[in-house]
Image (tube, rainbow, N blue to C red):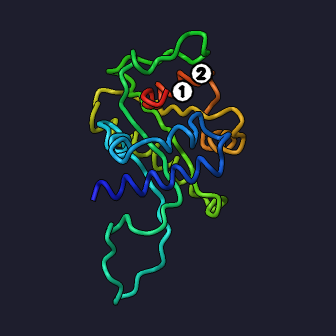
Amino acid sequence: NLAALAKRYSELRLAILLSAPSSFASSYAIESTLTQEQWEQRVWRNGVTVFVCIARPVLTETAEVPELGEFDGEWVGAATVFGPVPKDDYQLVPESGSPEAGPDEEEAKWQMTALFTSPEHRGKGLGKSLIKGAKAYAGIRTRALLPTAESFRLRIMAHSKNLTVVALYSQLGFMDVGRATGREAFVTNGDEALI
């Protein structure tokens, strides 16, 4: 049930925007105006993969099969990965300080965005698991889609005031290599329609 999955994602995303408004380039005021159809389009875009963390009780043998199957339960975290992105679309302006991306045939370029976990489930390693999952996914998909690529690059854009997530990314091998304006972040993260 794709509509139900998009609705569940929108509920989690809006709750996070309310609980941590300074952590994201977007806001509750912007995203709460999206229609169900717009949420579905955000989640089901070509080349986009959404990872979710779901909390649920251990099922017993007599438990009924939930409506959303494996996706049923309390959605407590998510991250979005898209790519591979062509170099011309991926490269930021020189003033950003971002290093030059490699040629498409040698380097696959991926973007990770919208990493979040619900406040009640923070400190349990969910963010770290989402990041590791995104990195593994980008590597596997690079080998499948671009067998000539020698490497892949996974970029994130973190709000400068979100020191917790900046530290988490740093622990997992990400480096601070440049700056982007809010507008550039929206476009790079595939959310230009929200500008």
SS class, disc 2: loop
Image location of residue 27, percent across then percent down: 58, 39
Label at residue 180: 2
Q: Earlier in the sequence, mark 1 or mark 2?
A: 2
Three-letter code, disc 1: Ala
Is 143 on the left-hand or right-hand side of 17? Answer: left
Image location of residue 159, percent across then percent down: 64, 34
What residue do we see at 33% from left, 74% from top?
66
- Asked if residue 88 is positioned above or below residue 114 in the image, the reply reads above
Three-letter code, disc 2: Ala
What residue do we see at 47% from left, 25% from top?
187
Considering depth in this image, is 125 or 72 the residue closer to the camera? 72
Considering depth in this image, is 164 or 140 the residue closer to the camera? 164
What residue do we see at 69% from left, 40% from top?
162
Crowding around mark 2 (Cα neighbors within 10 Å: few <14, some 14 to 19, many 20+) is some
SS class, disc 1: helix
Q: Which residue is mark 1?
A: 185
What residue do we see at 29% from left, 36% from top?
46
Image location of residue 64, percent across then percent down: 32, 82
Check whether the beta carbons of the residues at disc 1 and disc 2 lie within 8 A of each other. Answer: yes
